[in-house]
Image (cartoon, helix red, strand yellow):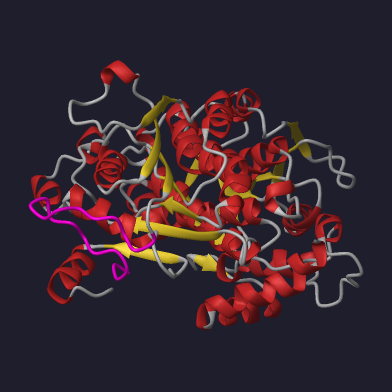
Amino acid sequence: MRVLITGGSDGLGAAVVRHLTQAGAQVWIIDKTAPQTHQSLRFLPCDLAQPDDLAGLPARLQQAGPFDLVVMSAGINAVGPFEAMPLATIRNLHAINCAAPILLAQHLLAQDLIAAGGRLVFIASVSHFTGYPGASVYAGGKDALVAFARSLRRPFWADHRITVQVATPGPMRTAHAARHAPPGSTGRGRACPDHIARAILRSKRRAVIVPGVASQAMALFGRLFPVQATQAMRKMLYERLV
Amino acid sequence: MLDTHPMQDHDQPLQLPPQGRQTWLVTGASAGIGLAVCQILHAAGHDVTGFGRRQAQDLPAGFPDIAYHTVDLATSQGCDLLAARAPHRLDRALLNAGLGYYRPLCRETPQAISDVLAVNLLAPMMAAHGLFGALLAGQGVLGLVGSTAYRGAAGMPVYAASKAGLDGFGRSLRSEWQGRVDVRVIHPGPTATGMAMRAGLTSPLALRMMLPVDAVAAGVIAAMQGQGRLRQRISFGAILRHKITGRAA
């Protein structure tokens, strides 16, 4: 199996890579920094915030593809009151979390780099169900990915036999999550990225994958009580950030 | 949805709403829903500053006598200009400028994708950032104009993504700014502005089923008044219900 993954050097992406390499897959990683483990992996350095870097990717991938699985896992976060967030941060969040996966999907499709029968998986966030006060730009970008995946699902299956999915993980024990947790957070209740990676890889058909018990509980609460869920997120995160 | 500010018929005299004269900022003012909103607001005696892509000399004949600035919100300079030219105190800011193409991903181009995401999602975020002070001073309402496509639309995936992003951003921002600035996301259904035809929609039935632009504009203005919910949809059902009962959806 040939796999392409963005953000595969760290966090959830690295956990996905670990599972896939154990299963014998050939993995190509797109990331800004090289992976710490698995030095033998094929690594394509790329700054996804730069459209020119992104546009150059398909040519570099031509020999490697077509891929049976593409995972758009690269993402960044920045927390704090929106009005105090530097404009450069807002631009960066938009470019990496929202524009890059959409542009890369277009490039891969145009160059026939996703194999028929393959999967295209976007990594969004459980904030899709709950909102995320204190990270409004992040929440917006992730919601865009959910709608984008939903929009692509039917035509991609009908025209290309490609399954499009989106996963909405909750907080995980990753360096990324620890950096953006409110001060004093113990990190308890965060899911292990390996469990989340396994849940995502196992779920081969579902349109929206809600991996892990914690994110399933958050998603259910958000679906049943959307206003209260956002209010709870505000109390737990935003009010501890300001 | 449409309860606080009744829709105006053109043969009836327009009156100031109970809140009195308001200071409005409207983006996407040179055409479509934004233009209709500016016309209704100006006729009702409100103070309106409009922003649009068209040059002043290219504005349509019926353009109201309001302050107007040309900006391209796909660029960072355009977003900076918007913040610089905005009034210092705002009652209402309606971020309505939008761009879209009715076509599948295989017929998209990277430039068009970047432009749609920049105008429909990044620009409203930058504008909201720049207008926070003015809205706070006026204890104002920030309106983000989305689309009912925000749940996903197979025929226009990039546009749907941009509007879903706006919805998700608005939801979290409303919570952040609660008690300071009221944030609302208004989702009109397909509206007969000509944007759909320019965007590549050719089905005659679909074009006939479009919502009338004046009714949508009045609905958008109504959604910006009074105590509003986060998410408000403008559909045939909502317009019809309002016409019959005079009350909200």
Q: Is the residue B225 above or below the residue B66 in the image?
A: below
Question: Do we see residue A75 in this rendering?
Answer: no
- Quarter location, residue A135: bottom right
**Residue B205's x, y, as percent?**
9, 51
**Residue A4's x, y, as percent?**
64, 43
Q: Is the residue A47 above or below the residue B124 in the image?
A: above
User: Which residue shows up at 52% across the image and 66% down it?
Assistant: A208
> Where the C terminus of chain B falls, by quadrant?
bottom left
Image position of A71 (left or right of B156): right
**Residue B171's x, y, as percent?**
54, 63
> Where the N terminus of chain B falls, by quadrant?
bottom left
User: Which residue shows up at 64% across the image and 75% down it?
Assistant: A231
Image position of B104 (left or right of A211): left
* Magenta-span inclusion, residue B11: yes
What range is drawn magenta here? B1-19
Question: Do we see residue A183 in this rendering?
Answer: yes
| A14, A87: nearer the viewer | A87
- Residue at far top of view: B57
User: Which residue shows up at 56% across the image and 55% down it?
Assistant: B169
Number of numbered labels in the structure image: 0
| A144, B169: nearer the viewer | B169
Q: Is the residue B165 above or below the residue A222 in the image?
A: above
| A213, A230: nearer the viewer | A230
